[in-house]
């Protein structure tokens, strides 16, 4: 009888830079975006180094040969922002991604729970997340809805700057 994989969720650090960059690239490519590792890596590294304002949590399959720190199979990144609307700090969940072959194992919920616990401990006033057109809206709304997120109607505009 095969045993269930040992799946853990923990905050990640510099040792996980390569794996986190690869997962973020995989996610972006799944959205049809052309992403270059050499361009993305410094942004991931900056996020990992700013542990006071950025939470990066990974989901790992532990005990696999060749993976000293476990194989990273999911990742969540949340940035702390100052909000006038909420009169204090809020968390902006920019990314929550689980590899397709590890979905439906509760990892997205565990990553989100870790962010909620961290945000509560820090005294954040709210957590915000945006579900894009390339996401699975039903799955995302089910996941976030279970954790008390409510849909609000907004239009987000974006301008790409130099780079």
Image (cartoon, grey):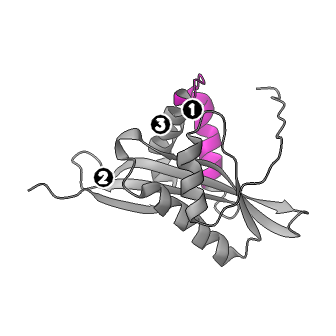
- Alpha carbon of mark 3 to alpha carbon of mark 1: how far? 10 Å
Which dot marks residue 68?
Answer: 2
Please, what secondary structure does the residue beneath circle 3 have? helix
Count neighbours of disc 1 (C-alpha within 10 A) and say few if under 14, some if 14 to 19, many if 20 or more: some
Q: Residue at x 49, y 33 (%)?
A: 26
As drawn, 41 above or below 128 = above
Q: Which residues are magenta?
A: 30-48
Q: Position of residue 70 (x, y in %)?
A: 33, 53
Q: Quadrant of the C terminus?
A: top right
Residue with the mark numbered 1 = 28
In this view of the protein, which residue sits in the foreground, 133 or 81? 133
Is there any visible trace of residue 12 in the rendered image? no
As drawn, 114 above or below 21 = below
Which dot marks residue 71?
Answer: none
Please, what secondary structure does the residue beneath circle 2 have? loop
Is 31 on the left or on the right of 122, as rendered? left
Which dot marks residue 22?
Answer: 3
Q: Residue at x 60, y 24 (%)?
A: 33
Magenta-colored segment: predominant secondary structure = helix
């Amino acid at each position: 009888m095969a045993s269930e994989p040992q799946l853990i969720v923990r905050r990640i650090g510099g040792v996980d830079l390569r794996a986190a960059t690869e997962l973020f690239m995989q996610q972006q490519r799944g959205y049809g975006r052309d992403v270059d590792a050499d361009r993305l890596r410094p942004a991931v590294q900056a996020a990992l180094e700013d542990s006071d304002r950025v939470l990066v949590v990974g989901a790992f399959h532990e005990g696999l040969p060749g993976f000293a720190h476990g194989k990273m199979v999911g990742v969540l990144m949340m940035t702390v922002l100052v909000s006038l609307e909420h009169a204090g700090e809020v968390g902006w969940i920019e990314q929550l991604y689980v590899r397709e072959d590890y979905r439906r194992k509760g990892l997205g919920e565990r990553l989100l729970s870790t962010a909620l616990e961290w945000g509560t401990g820090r005294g954040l006033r709210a957590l915000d997340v945006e579900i894009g057109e390339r996401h699975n809206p039903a799955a995302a709304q089910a996941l976030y809805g279970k954790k008390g997120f409510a849909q609000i109607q907004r239009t987000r505009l974006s301008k790409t700057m130099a780079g």
